[in-house]
């Protein structure tokens, strides 16, 4: 290992001639050929080292490799073939012979030895101007692995030697700052990751597992793949990593994860070694059915069949480099013979293995002796197989790339070269950096036509073949090309599949499915599952009225107003437009009845026309009769305008024509009524009344009445006419196409005018009832007007309550019913006489009495002089600090050794260095710690990673002494503050087992003990800072943040880790903006990004030096309104504050290293004098700057005397307000001291801590200190616990600080909280109580920083596929659903009996609707009911008082009282319909209604029969009354009523009515109603009533001819006419009315019919008894008193 130091010391050679000496040993190459120029090669012909952990008790030796890797030997032979081919080519490098040195080792450490050997050569000493004689290679080909290549490139790159790899794909190697001399002929994993992401997307695999090898190749490749996959909408169920040499339990954990996972596709980013181990374990546990997607490192490896479980890899898919063809390689490989490489042990072992013989002097026990005549000519093996040269072709191209670079170098002409002034390289002394310059510009075409060049990152063009692993007939596996990927093509054509069928993994016959959730079909939308990736979702059916016509739709779209979802809810189809059409049954029937009415009217007209000269026609005003018939025809026809699709004209026409025609009709009837009255008055002596109402006046009255309606219609049509209207409100699933009224006043004015005329006509006709029977048609007009009024009064509630087309049907029904009523009542009796009773159509008969009515050897070579402070001691501690802070690099274009120097000064680093001096002196004064031992120190200063590495190497080397060898070697190294520098240092000093303790390197990457085995730190790892920052952001609700970070290891790693962990916590990053000090454009781009961003919180993750540069640039740019959160590296640096930065830094907060108290330190630091360090030019420079004086005579400044007082100076060094990072330095020195203390303890001949032999202070070695440093555990004077965990990390404790600035720019950094990782989970982060916090961005309260405001209750969160998960959309919950949480992923459907409140955040019980006594409608109906009872009771009292009078007796008093009793019950039964339905009320209401009405009508029927019987009894010899006496009357009423009782009993027994909560009609409320139970029962009850009413009507009609004074049959006929009209109109109104209106219609019908019976039958009699008692006599009843006329 001492050889390693030599490498870095070459870099720091002194100026002038020097001698290069090889210190240590170097292994000879496995294969070697001399030449003018030498190319190096590093391959691993053998693999598989035993897992050995170095104990640092001896120098690590080269470890033995166990297994053959024939593929790597083939690579080496391809390199030899290419070199020999180039040497034979006269056009390529003429007169120059290429040689090679090819090494064979395995394991990163041993591979690194070989790389150093290729750099140093084999000669022990070279006396030349430089150490780059031909013994040093011009370039290195290799290695195949990314991790070894990274190690090679990091070291070799600093000596400008090109490294060209054929197989190292890690994307991290693109970093030209880290690996400036690296090139490769294989595409970067960045492209492979993109290709793999496109592959899984192509097959729809959105839910996959990911497993990587635990090294740079695997982890970086996997990270790039995951990033690319997520951009393509692919989710990773799990991401695991392991190593072939790692612990077995990790492999078992991965297998268990695979077993438990739901994904069937696994992305394996690893080498052939790891995949074989994993496949074998899965095979043992019988885990099959998986589809593997592989990286190029194993997908075409021939050794896969060596594993036990290779069968489960059949069907794997993966990208690999394109295959090539190398003419002559087959012959070369088959001619390989041990005699060609006599010094190669591997070739001998290979030969013995292939031919199963022995080349040793004696044959082995199991092998015969080799003859030497064996040949590979007939051997078919992986070595001789040239059918698919993929990575082998890359080796071939790599050699040719170097050869072309050398060829261009030799062919350079003076004045045209790439160096200064067009110079060319000295071909006799070629420098590697010159080869590097030419290699970067190589551009040539291979024999196959493939163009080879390198981009700015050293990458070659990315082209891949997609291969599918299949089993061959020989039992091996081969990769069949099934697709291609070319990154140079447009994105849409980069990945294509050919027409070759694919063999799928797991024995599947079709493309495997691997999704977390099945695709949501059309008609559903995705609802994110809380706490799961975006690929895991539920498929929720689209709410009512919404559709999704895409698979995996994020949300449903509302259909346009005129559209409604189809059954599958994947398309909006036009809503059904509903209107009363001729094509439907209802429309057809109504049209038929309309035409029938027209037909009957026309027939009637014809009858009248044919008989116009007859007395009946002439006596009934033939002119008005024909006009009435014409108007009735128009009335029937106008109903047709209501049927069909509404149009602008039909809407205006229907209501106006209806209104005018009906007025015309009523006007004619009114005219006829007036004529009847006038005609009667004209018969009185001396009357001349007819001249005032003759034909002219009749026409004029009809015209006048009609013109008024015409004027009303004209005003209506002028102001706000009816118009066709699509009603979307009543039904959501269909459109009610209707005629809107326009002006409702106009409509009701038209209807009101008709009602006025009808009422006038009814009154006049009623007055004319006493005119002579045979002549008078007033009775028929009264009947017709009674029907007309009953129909239209019933029409109003039915019209208002009926929905959609039913309201139109109700109106047509009313038109037809009233029209038929007029037609039948007025004209049917006349037609009957004209056609069937012509004998009565005589003038004589008309003058009589007739009438009619519906995420080691010391040798110092080179430049020294980095040591700044030192003190001798028994044991020495080293330290590396950047006291001078800015690095200037001389750009010499690689024409000389690069040189850099430092400028400026970092006072904080000076403070750190002086703190080491203070602490060492304090320890030396302590008699209890290291008694008898004096500590010394060597503190070095440097800037820039290159100078700091030199300083670290100088510290580790110690001083050169011929007598003592290496002296003053340090036991431990303190520093550095920078994570990146600490990483470089530990990579160098780690193999020498020298412990390194940093006080400020926080990068989480340094916790990896495999890479940094000797690294410790007294500052918490960034991993803890990231956790603390996430806790802070969660606490304040900042879930949308921006990140600005510097291009450094510290910031880059921390930012990546923060982003990864933030996703887990639901925090999204709007942007991640990197800045570089060398690029002004990055600052401008960052400023623009911050200014345009929507996030209010900006995380500034960068080192102090970067922060200063950043703030200097940002203060010139006016960016306000942001809350800045800083990393601990700068958040406590008060010197950053200034008045110009207040807008940025005011309110900034971040986690800082806790404050500490170190007694005596402040005084020590402030008592510094130049005389304390007389050799330090840096202290003198510091003093001169601090006091503006000079130690040398100067004209511009005063002389320094060296006794000035530092307390008068204000800078980072003199700031003693708080010790944060300084305390970490203090603890680091004490940690080394305690480790040395425990190491030097001795009891009974052994160390009490470790039990090993005692060590004296002269025998201390760093590796012993390292061992004891791990066991350190002590407490400082300030109470801080110092110990290290297994990763070298200390306990994480932070202060949360807040910048509170004043107007002058000064700042007070206030502690507002803390974070302690040792506390319980919920108590790790806490804010101080009663502390004032200043917020950034001029915010007076906690700033909100979210991409989207939280979705409030009443809305649901919908994921936006193209944005981060924090950027979601909020959609209002659909109708009938709620969300009662913030950011609810879905809305919940309310239970059936509940409905959302207005905010849709709570389900409230639906209001129940029924007719109650408290509402206006219920109260009015109750009032009318009570009025009816009162009137019935009053009538009963009147009848009871006058029971002995003739009129009571003559009208069957017993039945009259029973009828009045039944009428009271009818009025009272309507009350059962009002109020909340219950089980009993539901059964009671219909049965009580049915029975009481039957009882009522039975009484009426009995009365009618009595009238008829009584009349017949007056005939001579008639004895009919004995068959219908009082007993029979009672019996008939009982019989009729009992039949209804039986019907009701059957109904209640079989399926009675019951209270029902109807939730179908209205979604937002419950209709509490009485369900009928058996509809047959209900209609049977109603039908029986109708039957009795019809019978009663017919009998009463037959009794119309009985004597007027005695007969009540006329009144019964009137009452039954009203009864039938009401209940016929009730049926369509009842069927079409919704909710409580159905009940209201039924109550209305009950009350209307009851009032009709009461008024028609009893009011005339009460009138006579009260107002006309003189008519209440037997004599008058018998008709013996002459009638009085009007």
Image (cartoon, rainbow, N blue to C red):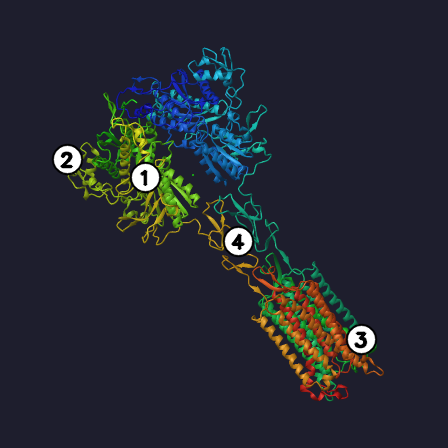
User: Residue 1146 got which mark?
Assistant: none
Front disc: 1 or 3: 1
Q: Position of residue 1225 (x, y in %)?
A: 27, 38
Task: Give how far apart the Cα atoms at labels 1 and 2 are.
Answer: 44 Å
Q: Helix, strand, or loop for circle 2?
A: loop
Task: Give how far apart the Cα atoms at labels 2 and 3 are.
Answer: 152 Å
Of the image marks 1 and 2, the number of the one nearer the N terminus: 1
871 sits to left or right of 1658: left
Of the image marks 4 and 3, the number of the one nearer the N terminus: 3
Marks 2 and 3 close (CB-CB < 8 Å): no
On the question of residue 758 being in view, the answer is no
Q: Position of residue 470 (x, y in %)?
A: 56, 28
| Label 3 packing within 10 angstroms: few (<14), some (14-19), many (20+) | some
User: Residue 1019 got which mark?
Assistant: 1
Q: Which quadrant is the C terminus positioned in?
A: bottom right
Marks 1 and 3 close (CB-CB < 8 Å): no
Q: Which quadrant is the N terminus positioned in?
A: top left
User: Residue 1388 got which mark?
Assistant: 4
Task: Give how far apart the Cα atoms at labels 4 and 3 are.
Answer: 73 Å
On the question of residue 320 being in view, the answer is yes
208 sits to left or right of 425: right
Of the image marks 1 and 3, the number of the one nearer the N terminus: 3
Above or below residue 1564? Residue 944 is above
Task: Give how far apart the Cα atoms at labels 2 and 4 are.
Answer: 87 Å
Query: Label 2: which residue?
Result: 1193
Query: Label 3: which residue?
Result: 833
């Amino acid at each position: 290992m001492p050889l390693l130091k030599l490498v870095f010391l070459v870099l720091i050679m002194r100026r002038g001639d020097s001698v290069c000496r090889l210190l240590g040993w170097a292994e000879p190459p496995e294969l070697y050929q001399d030449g003018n120029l030498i190319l190096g090669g590093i391959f691993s012909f053998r693999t598989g080292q035993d897992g050995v952990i170095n104990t640092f008790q001896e120098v690590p030796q080269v470890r033995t490799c166990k297994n053959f890797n024939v593929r790597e030997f083939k690579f080496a032979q391809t390199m030899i073939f290419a070199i020999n081919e180039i040497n034979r080519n006269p056009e390529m490098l003429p007169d120059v012979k290429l040689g090679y040195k090819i090494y064979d080792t395995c394991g990163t450490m041993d591979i690194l030895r070989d790389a150093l050997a290729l750099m140093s050569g084999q000669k022990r000493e070279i006396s030349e101007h430089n150490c780059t004689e031909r013994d040093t290679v011009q370039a290195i080909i290799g290695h195949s692995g990314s991790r070894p290549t990274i190690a090679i490139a990091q070291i070799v790159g600093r000596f400008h030697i090109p490294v060209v790899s054929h197989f190292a794909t890690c994307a991290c190697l693109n970093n030209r700052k880290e690996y400036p001399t690296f090139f490769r002929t294989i595409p970067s994993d960045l492209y492979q990751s993109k290709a793999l992401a496109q592959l899984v997307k192509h097959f729809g695999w959105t839910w996959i597992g990911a497993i990587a090898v635990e090294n740079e190749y695997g982890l970086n490749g996997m990270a790039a793949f995951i990033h690319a996959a997520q951009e393509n909408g692919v989710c990773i169920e799990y991401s695991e990593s392991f190593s072939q040499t790692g612990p077995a339990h990790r492999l078992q954990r991965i297998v268990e994860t695979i077993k438990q996972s739901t994904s069937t596709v696994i992305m394996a980013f690893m080498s052939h070694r790891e995949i074989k181990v994993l496949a074998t374990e899965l095979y043992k546990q019988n885990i099959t059915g998986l589809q593997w997607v592989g990286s190029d490192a194993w997908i075409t490896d021939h050794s896969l069949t060596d594993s036990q479980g290779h069968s489960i890899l059949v069907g794997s898919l993966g990208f690999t480099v394109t295959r090539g063809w190398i003419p002559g390689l087959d012959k070369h490989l088959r001619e390989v013979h041990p005699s060609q490489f006599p010094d190669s042990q591997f070739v001998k072992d290979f030969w013995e293995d292939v031919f199963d013989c022995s080349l040793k002097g004696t044959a082995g026990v199991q092998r015969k002796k080799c003859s030497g005549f064996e040949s590979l000519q007939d051997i078919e093996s992986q070595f001789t197989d040239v059918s698919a040269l993929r990575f082998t072709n890359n080796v071939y191209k790599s050699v040719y790339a170097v050869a072309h670079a050398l060829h261009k170098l030799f062919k350079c002409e003076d004045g045209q070269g790439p160096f200064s002034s067009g110079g060319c390289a000295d071909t006799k002394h070629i420098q590697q950096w010159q080869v590097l310059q030419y290699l970067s510009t190589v551009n040539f075409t291979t024999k196959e036509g493939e163009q080879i060049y390198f981009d700015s990152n050293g990458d070659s063009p990315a082209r891949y073949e997609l291969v599918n692993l299949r089993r061959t007939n020989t039992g091996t596996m081969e990769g069949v090309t099934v697709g291609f990927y070319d990154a140079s093509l447009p994105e849409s054509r980069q990945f294509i599949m050919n027409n070759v069928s694919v063999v799928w993994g797991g024995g599947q016959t079709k493309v495997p499915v691997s999704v977390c959730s099945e695709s949501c079909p059309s008609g559903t939308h995705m609802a994110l599952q809380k706490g799961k990736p975006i690929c895991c979702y539920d498929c929720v059916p689209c709410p009512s009225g919404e559709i999704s016509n895409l698979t995996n739709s994020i949300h449903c779209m509302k259909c346009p107003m005129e559209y409604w979802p189809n059954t599958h809810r994947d398309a909006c189809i036009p809503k059904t437009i509903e209107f009363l059409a001729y094509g439907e049954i209802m429309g057809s029937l109504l049209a038929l009845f309309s035409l029938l009415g027209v037909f009957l009217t026309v027939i009637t007209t014809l009858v009248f026309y044919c008989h116009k000269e007859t007395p009946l026609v002439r006596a009934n005003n033939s002119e008005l009769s024909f006009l009435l018939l014409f108007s009735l025809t128009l009335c029937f026809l106008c109903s047709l305008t209501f049927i069909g699709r509404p149009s602008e004209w039909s809407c205006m026409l229907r209501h106006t024509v209806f209104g005018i025609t009906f007025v015309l009709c009523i006007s004619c009837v009114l005219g006829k009524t007036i004529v009847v009255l006038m005609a009667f008055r004209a018969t009185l002596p001396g009357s001349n009344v007819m001249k005032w109402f003759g034909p002219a006046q009749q026409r004029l009255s009809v015209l006048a009445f009609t013109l008024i309606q015409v004027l009303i219609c004209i005003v209506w049509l002028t102001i706000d006419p009816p118009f066709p209207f699509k009603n979307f409100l009543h039904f959501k699933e269909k459109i009610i196409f209707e005629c809107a009224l326009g002006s409702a006043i106009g409509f009701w004015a038209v209807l009101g005018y008709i009602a006025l005329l009808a009422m006038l006509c009814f009154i006049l006709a009623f007055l004319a009832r006493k005119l002579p029977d045979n002549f008078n048609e007033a009775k028929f007009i009264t009947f017709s007007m009674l029907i007309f009024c009953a129909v239209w009064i019933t029409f109003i509630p039915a019209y208002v309550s009926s929905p959609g087309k039913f309201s139109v049907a109700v109106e047509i029904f009313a038109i037809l019913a009233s029209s038929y009523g007029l037609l039948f009542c007025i004209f049917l009796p006349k037609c009957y006489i004209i056609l069937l009773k012509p004998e009565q159509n005589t003038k004589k008969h008309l003058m009589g009495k007739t009438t009619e009515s519906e995420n080691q050897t010391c040798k110092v070579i080179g430049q020294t002089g980095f040591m700044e402070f030192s003190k001798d001691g028994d044991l020495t501690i080293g330290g590396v600090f950047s006291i001078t802070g800015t690095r200037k690099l001389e750009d010499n274009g690689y024409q000389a050794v690069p040189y850099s120097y430092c400028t400026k000064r970092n006072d904080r680093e000076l403070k750190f260095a002086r703190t080491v001096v203070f602490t060492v002196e304090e320890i030396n004064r302590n008699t209890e710690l290291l008694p008898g031992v004096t500590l010394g120190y060597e503190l070095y200063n440097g800037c820039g990673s290159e100078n700091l590495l030199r300083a670290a190497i100088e510290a580790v080397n110690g001083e050169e002494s011929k007598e003592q060898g290496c002296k003053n070697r340090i036991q431990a190294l303190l520093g550095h503050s920078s994570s990146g520098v600490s990483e470089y240092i530990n990579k160098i000093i780690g193999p020498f087992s020298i412990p390194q303790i940093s006080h400020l390197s926080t990068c989480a990457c340094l916790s990896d003990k495999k890479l940094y085995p000797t690294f410790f730190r007294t500052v918490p790892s960034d991993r803890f800072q990231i956790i603390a920052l996430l806790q802070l952001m969660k606490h304040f609700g900042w879930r949308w943040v921006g990140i600005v970070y510097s291009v450094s290891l510290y910031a880059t790693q921390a930012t990546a880790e923060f982003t990864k962990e933030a996703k887990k916590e639901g925090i999204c990053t709007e942007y991640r903006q990197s800045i570089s000090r060398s690029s002004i454009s990055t600052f401008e781009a960052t400023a623009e990004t911050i200014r345009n961003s929507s996030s209010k919180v900006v995380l500034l993750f960068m080192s102090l030096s970067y922060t200063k540069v950043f703030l200097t640039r940002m203060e010139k740019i006016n960016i306000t309104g942001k809350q800045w959160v800083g990393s601990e590296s700068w958040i406590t640096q008060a010197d950053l504050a200034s008045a110009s930065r207040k807008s940025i830094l005011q309110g900034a907060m971040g986690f800082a290293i806790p404050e500490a108290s170190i007694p005596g330190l402040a005084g020590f630091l402030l008592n510094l004098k130049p005389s304390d360090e007389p050799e330090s030019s840096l202290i003198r420079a510091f003093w001169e700057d601090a006091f503006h004086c000079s130690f040398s005579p100067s004209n511009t400044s005063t002389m320094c005397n060296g006794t000035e007082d530092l307390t008068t100076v204000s800078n980072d060094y003199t700031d003693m307000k708080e010790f944060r990072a300084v305390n970490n330095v203090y603890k680091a020195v004490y940690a080394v001291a305690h480790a040395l203390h425990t190491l030097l303890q001795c009891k009974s001949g052994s160390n009490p801590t470790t039990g090993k032999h005692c060590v004296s202070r002269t025998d201390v070695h760093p590796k012993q200190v390292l061992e004891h440093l791990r066991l350190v555990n002590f407490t400082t004077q300030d109470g801080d616990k110092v110990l290290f965990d297994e990763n070298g990390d200390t306990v994480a404790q932070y202060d949360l600080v807040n910048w509170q600035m004043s107007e002058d720019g000064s700042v007070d950094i206030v502690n507002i909280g803390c974070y302690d990782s040792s506390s319980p989970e919920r108590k790790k982060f806490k804010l101080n109580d009663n502390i004032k916090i200043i917020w950034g961005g001029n915010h007076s309260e906690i700033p909100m920083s979210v991409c989207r405001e939280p979705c409030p209750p009443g809305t649901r969160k919908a994921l936006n596929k193209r944005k981060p998960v924090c950027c979601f959309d909020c959609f209002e919950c659909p109708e009938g659903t709620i969300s009662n949480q913030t950011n609810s992923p879905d809305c919940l459907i309310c239970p059936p009996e509940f409905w959302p409140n207005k905010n849709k955040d709570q389900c409230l019980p639906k209001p129940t609707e029924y007719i109650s006594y408290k509402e206006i409608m219920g109260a009015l109906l109750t009032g009318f009911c009570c009025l009816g009872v009162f009137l019935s009771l009053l009538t009963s009292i009147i009848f009871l008082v006058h029971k002995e009078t003739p009129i009571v007796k003559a009208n069957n008093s017993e039945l009259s009282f029973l009828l009045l009793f039944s009428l009271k019950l009818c009025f009272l039964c309507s009350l059962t319909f009002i109020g909340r339905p219950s089980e009993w009320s539901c059964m009671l209401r219909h049965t009580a209604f049915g029975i009481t009405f039957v009882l009522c009508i039975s009484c009426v029927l009995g009365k009618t029969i009595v009238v008829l019987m009584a009349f017949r009894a007056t005939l001579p010899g008639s004895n009919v009354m004995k068959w219908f006496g009082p007993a029979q009357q009672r019996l008939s009423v009982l019989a009729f009523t009992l039949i209804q009782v039986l019907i009701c009993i059957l109904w209640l027994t079989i399926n009675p009515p019951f209270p029902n909560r109807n939730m179908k009609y209205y979604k937002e409320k419950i209709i509490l109603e009485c369900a009928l139970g058996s509809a047959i029962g209900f209609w049977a009850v109603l039908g029986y009533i109708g039957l009795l009413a019809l019978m009663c009507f017919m009998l009463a009609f037959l009794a119309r001819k009985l004597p007027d004074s005695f007969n009540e049959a006329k009144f019964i006929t009137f009452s039954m006419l009203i009864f039938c009209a009401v209940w016929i109109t009730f049926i369509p109104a009842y069927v079409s009315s919704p909710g409580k209106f159905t009940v209201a219609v039924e109550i209305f019908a009950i009350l209307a019919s009851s009032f009709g019976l009461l008024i028609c039958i009893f009011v005339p009699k009460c009138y006579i008894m009260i107002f006309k008692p003189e008519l209440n006599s037997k004599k008058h009843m018998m008709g013996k008193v002459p009638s009085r006329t009007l």
